[in-house]
Amino acid sequence: MAGIEADADGAVRIGGNGPRLSIGLPRHVIGPEGSDTVTWSMRTTRDPDETETVCLAGSLRATIRHELGPDSWRVRVALDNVTEDALSLSRATVDIDPGDGTSWVWAAGSAGLVVLASDPPAGLWVLALKQGLLTRTDDQVAWIEDGVQLAAGSRLVMELSGRRHHGWGEIGALLPAWLPALAVRGGEPVDFTLPDAGFVAPGCVIEEGSGSTEINGEGQRYVSVRGAFGELELELAFAPRFEDAVQATARQIARLVVQLPGAVHQLDGTGPRTRSRGLERTARRLVVLQAAHSDAAADVVRGWLLDGVTDLLQSGGLPGPFALAALAGELQRRDDPQALSALLDSLPEVESEPGTLLALTRVWAALWGLGHDPEPVRQTLAWAMAQPSGSRLESIERELVSGAPDAPVRLLAALGGGLPGDPLPAAESWESAYAVALASLVSDDSPERPQLVHAAEITARRVTARDPSDPDVLAWLLLGE
């Protein structure tokens, strides 16, 4: 079957090396005689359009069935307690390996989506929860949580129903029609039009109106919504205005520059590689100061950066992307001849890592805008483009710069198309901010650009809500400005 196939062990893979989904069963059970480890015996039968795995372990019987069509996919799991005693179960999971593709999961209780995106031709598959529950903790997606009781002679069922989609724009229709935007900025509320639902939102202010409920808060919060659809646990993101976050963080950095300089810049007694990492940390803080027009503190950190780049180059080290971006920022701030000299000295060979191409495009724009010859940047870009990429996002960065037609679609998958939820495995905050910055490399005439701009803004709100004063995250976001 083109693009989707079942493995011999009952798992299903999208494309040859794309995402893979399998069902995990409870490993422990507590019954009348205490706690036992569950050892499952399994038998899988496969037909062209169906794979069924029957699993037996003492008093438990599970059936895992995948029904596959050219553009459809249904997963149904049934777990039966065939004894006369109630049992307490350990967690059972939906196990997802993104492979060479991308996976995105929204697991909110009685509603959920599993998105598996591989590169063409296998494409984009979305499975929506039709029965049962889905919850998520870090990189585990559970359909049974620890401690769930299974009564004598009863059954637990989880069903996902999915199909192949042609674009991320189609997926939003699978979300509950009443679901509002869950990530907002600048003191805006999250507004639910659910007059018959109940809300519990610790740390938030709930205001009931005629036909709607407004929830106001700060930072990352959670709301439990209970109605005829069941109970959902939703993550809310109340982010400050981006400009306000940059200004507030710049003020914190400026205070540290005066009171505790080592918290901003510390490079002593380390080798070239470690010195490069330390200099990147300093440069990220300078990028924030530049954006906030905090000139007095920026002047001090500028001096540290210039000395650090000189020492780094003399020791055989390579400057990273933020050192380049901060030097370009100094050029733009006051056409700084020392920054220009340090920048040109840095360009022949730079550290090839996430953000290098982004930074070089910023350097190009700074040189061009001030009438300097950007040819050294072109040569460095060519060198950096020829280096191997260490991650999927780095690969996307290279493809965007080279104009690869599939690159915007791959970036949209990394951003989850603007859907609620998170990638699997979960991304660190800087990685999410890096993906947001990459959206700036997408051309205005790309068909995906409007949705990419939307998805990038949703992600930016979420990462700044989690920690609005993280200078490293803010610097990544500013790199894409």
Image (cartoon, rainbow, N blue to C red):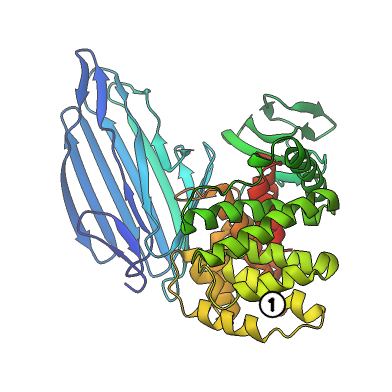
User: In which quadrant of the rendered view does residue 337 lie?
Assistant: bottom right
Give the percent coordinates (x, y) of residue 418.
63, 56
Camera-side residue: 88 or 331? Answer: 331
Label 1: few (<14), some (14–19) or many (≥20) C-alpha neighbours in 10 Å: some
User: In which quadrant of the rendered view does residue 433 lie?
Assistant: bottom right
Residue receiving disc 1: 443
Give the percent coordinates (x, y) of residue 248.
80, 41
Label 1 is placed on what type of residue?
Answer: Ser
Q: What element carries label 1?
A: loop
Camera-side residue: 352 or 152? Answer: 352
Is 57 left or right of 89, judged from the image as shown?
Answer: left
On the question of residue 153 being in view, the answer is yes
Looking at the rendered structure, the number of numbered marks drawn on it comes to 1
For the point 68% across and 54% down, the residue is: 304
Picture quarter with the C terminus: bottom right
Give the percent coordinates (x, y) of residue 187.
82, 39
On the question of residue 167 being in view, the answer is no
